[in-house]
């Protein structure tokens, strides 16, 4: 195994854990001796990785660590490029520009050979939606998800009747050429799903809903029969 790949695997092993992990465990996972593991940790620290701990106590990667350029394998670069290209040609106007900016930032921190791999990726997303970057409803919904604020919906139901609801957004799923919002409906006092293309109007009320979105998401995933967007 190449040294760069070994260091990458070590960083991945640290990233997966939220608590300190013993050197012996890390050495076993990466297939090296304990002495080599300590040298690899020292190397990563010298490159800027924020690794806390010491021999005998365990090691932990801080959440605010600096991302070394070697962190992306060929397969990871392909996954990133494909995901970003999907957003660039998607219906969300704001995410389209965000994806372009993210691609530029990632390319800027990659070393030359990794940047060439990124530019030469031959994977392209061919989304079924007909128009690119023209649905501003999605940016409003994403903002309420992010800020945990109530969303007002003017909506057409399955029977074609118009209805107005105040909901607490829980998750936004992208499937084929449609998007679906899962939310807690204050009128029905239950989780409901709403197709975005059936929304006539959306508005952020800027009113914080009383329960954490993470709690609502957990309750929806574990106790309700709605599709799970993982």
Image (cartoon, rainbow, N blue to C red):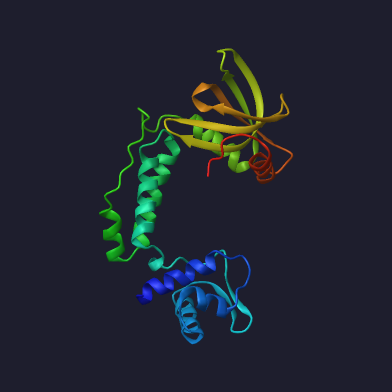
Relative horizontal placement of residue 113, taking residue 199 as reference (left or right): left
Q: Residue at x 63, y 42 (%)?
A: 221
Residue 127 appears in which quarter of the rendering?
Answer: top left
Q: Quadrant of residue 157?
A: top right
Q: Residue at x 39, y 49 (%)?
A: 101
Q: Position of residue 137 (x, y in %)?
A: 50, 29
> Residue 99 vs residue 184: left or right?
left
Residue 185: horizontal and vertical position, in percent?
68, 28
In this rendering, position of residue 101 left or right of residue 140: left
* Residue 161 vertical position relative to residue 209 in the rendered view, above or below: above
**Relative to the observer, which residue lies in front, 196 or 23?**
23
Compared across the picture, whether 196 is left or right of 80 comes to right
Q: Could you say which quadrant of the image residue 20 lies in? A: bottom right
Task: Kindly identify the residue that appears in the image at 55 percent across and 34 percent down.
Answer: 141
Q: Nearer the viewer, residue 70 or 96?
A: 70
Count of labels shown?
0
Q: Position of residue 167 (x, y in %)?
A: 66, 30
Residue visible at 59% across and 84% down? 55
From the image, which quarter does the N terminus lie in?
Answer: bottom left
Q: Where residue 40 sits in the image (x, y, percent)?
A: 46, 80
């Amino acid at each position: 195994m190449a040294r760069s790949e070994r260091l990458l695997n070590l960083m991945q092993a640290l990233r997966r854990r939220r608590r300190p992990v013993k050197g012996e465990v890390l050495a076993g996972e990466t297939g090296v001796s304990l002495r080599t593991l300590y040298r690899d940790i020292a190397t990563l620290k010298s490159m800027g990785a924020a690794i806390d701990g010491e021999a005998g106590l365990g090691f932990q990667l801080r959440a605010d660590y600096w991302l070394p350029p070697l962190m992306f394998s060929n397969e990871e670069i392909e996954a990133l490029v494909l995901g970003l290209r999907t957003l660039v040609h998607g219906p969300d106007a704001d995410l389209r520009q965000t994806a372009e900016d993210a691609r530029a930032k990632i390319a800027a921190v990659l070393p030359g050979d990794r940047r060439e791999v990124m530019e030469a990726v031959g994977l392209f997303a061919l989304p079924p939606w007909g128009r690119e970057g023209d649905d501003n409803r999605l940016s409003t919904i994403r903002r309420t998800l992010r800020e945990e604020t109530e969303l007002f919906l003017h909506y057409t139901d399955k029977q074609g009747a118009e209805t107005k609801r105040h909901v607490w957004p829980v998750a936004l799923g992208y499937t084929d050429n449609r998007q679906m919002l899962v939310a807690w409906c204050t009128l029905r006092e239950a989780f409901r799903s709403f197709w975005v293309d059936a929304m006539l109007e959306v508005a952020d009320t800027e009113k914080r809903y009383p329960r954490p979105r993470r709690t609502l998401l957990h309750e929806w995933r574990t106790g309700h029969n709605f599709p799970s967007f993982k």
